[in-house]
Image: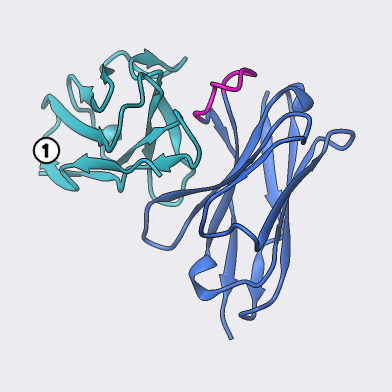
Amino acid sequence: EVQLLESGGGLVQPGGSLRLSCAASGFTFSSYAMSWVRQAPGKGLEWVSTISGSGGSTYYADSVKGRFIISRDNSKNTLYLQMNSLRAEDTAVYYCAKPPGMATTSGSFDYWGQGTLVTVSS
Amino acid sequence: AIRMTQSPSSFSASTGDRVTITCRASQGISSYLAWYQQKPGKAPNLLIYAASTLQSGVPSRFSGSGSGTDFTLTISCLQSEDFATYYCQQYYSYPRTFGQGTKVEIK
């Protein structure tokens, strides 16, 4: 059974940093690109970042480019999101998500974690 | 970035109704489109991918169609558990983008 378990969320001041983790199980982690998607309170879904299975390719939304870093440790089956220079508008539930297939064209998300809340406030 | 526009943003319907939600892409995305259902406090659930392929375990009353720029999600006979918010998402290119959501409420 596929499981994705996020952790690391919490309250942080503007300008601060936070690192989210997503522990994966139930599938061959290194074979799949993995993504972060966020949802601000009462708002819609926003794709944040994707990393290839090997970790060699990364993609970011313009809203986080230069501030967030996605990475993975395939030996630990864990996905990370390092969030720096946090702003109030980064306040959201952050989900890690897995695509249905291993192909680079497989860009939908068939499994999601439960989400971890990040609140940026003074 | 490709902009995804859903319509309507919300509407009311009754159990048993046939409902259709549309999603329009600002440029052609072939069939690289997915539909999700989300209920309050829960993660999204994949319903349809590749514009018309039903995800395993999703009831057959859900169907998707379209290609290029115009897409539809149809629920053939609305059930009580279908009252939720629905999102489309393109994965033709980066950045991945979602529609703003369509909330289906009980009439």
Task: Please state the chain letter of the residue tagged with numbered disc 1 in the rendered image.
Answer: B
Q: Is residue B96 left or right of residue A9?
A: left
- The x, y position of residue B29, in whole percent, is 36, 26
Q: Which secondary structure dominates the residues rendered in magenta?
A: loop
Question: What residue is shown with label 1?
Answer: B13
State the image quarter where residue B105 is shown. top left
* A103 in the magenta segment: yes
Rendered position, A38 above or below B22: below
Q: How is the image coloured?
A: by chain
* A90 in the magenta segment: no
The N terminus of chain A is located in which quarter?
A: top right
Range drawn in magenta: A100-108
Chain letter for cyan, please.
B
State the image quarter where residue A41 is shown. bottom left
Q: Colour of chain A?
A: blue
Q: Is residue B84 left or right of residue A109?
A: left
